[in-house]
Image: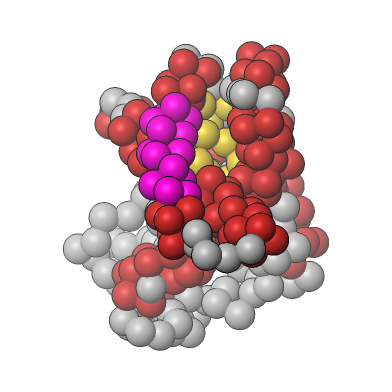
Amino acid sequence: MNELVTGDAVVLGLRPAKLPSRALAVVIDLVVVWAAYIVVSIVLTIATDSLDTAAVAALAVASFLLIPVGVPIAVETLSHGRSLGKLACGLRVVRDDGGPIRFRHALVRGAMGVVELLMSFGVIACVASLVSARGRRVGDLFAGTLVVRERVPTDRGRPVPPPPPWLVGRFSELDLSSVPDDLWLAIRQYLTRMGQLDAGVGWSMSQRLAADLAARTGVPLPPGVPPAAYLAAVVNERQARDSRRAFGSAAAAAAAVGPVGGAAPAVRPPQVRPAVVGQSDAVPQDTPQDVAAPPASRFAPPA
């Protein structure tokens, strides 16, 4: 399996698509798109028989830009990276950090696809995919995207652990626009693999990543918050925002554990219960005891 690895030698749980599956998906998409383009061209030719040559040429150019170029861009944007061919082959276009693509990513891929796939008959795309270690074509390099396989064994999935409940929604006002994708990738892979790391190494990595994230956002790490918990809370906030943009406010509220149709509520700082005899660790009152959460040791400093 061709896996993605961060600079910290942490393996990413995505499987990049190989050239054969990508080529099959492109062939399916091109057959559908060009069939629609031929049908539309025939209809336009019959309907514009009485127009002059200039008007017919303008309509031909517009139909070419709208169907073979515009339709794939719109489909990838609306389906979040899954065209008809990719859906049939079990593929999806994602960002470098594994998040869903947006219109600008689909636009760059579509514009470069005119040269890579249409003008060069796919030669440039095939050569670029063979040279790239992750099977990326030139459009993926410019757009910062990656085509991955979705049909993988479920036991390989490693979800990002949720933050402590008292941190959910605390960073709803944080500006995340300056955080690069490679930093998000490193944070996500640290969170999914921190249980496998040595306690001291994991703690130092979380401190460095938290410092980098705080420098990018311009807001220092809140006092008393473990770096790993801070990273998990910020990633949770970003996932909620992505869900809000992609699927609406209901999905974002579910991701952020907040009310439907609005932003996640500002959560109060954790309240410490009075110490009782035989109990050495204070538990925040806001933490529900019947909800599965990662062990507190994951977010605690090494002994």
Q: Is 60 or 197 nearer to us in this picture?
A: 60
What x and y, as percent, mark residue 80? 45, 53
Inspect this view and state whether residue 267 appears.
Answer: yes
Give residue 138's quadrant in the image: top right
Inspect this view and state whether residue 129 appears.
Answer: no
What's the magenta region? 25-42
Using residue 5 as the reference point, say whether residue 245 is left or right of it.
left
Magenta span dominant secondary structure: helix
Q: Is 82 or 210 nearer to us in this picture?
A: 82
Instruction: Give the residue furthest to the left.
Output: 290
Task: Find out whether residue 235 is within the magenta segment.
Answer: no
Q: Which residue does the image show at 38% across and 77% down from the upper left?
A: 249
Instruction: Give the residue furthest to the front.
Output: 50
Q: Which residue does the image show at 26% across and 55% down from the upper left?
A: 292
In the image, residue 28 above or below residue 97: above
Q: Quadrant of the C terminus?
A: top right
In the image, residue 276 above or below residue 47: below
What x and y, as percent, mark residue 208? 73, 47
Q: Which residue does the image show at 53% across and 22% down from the upper left?
A: 3
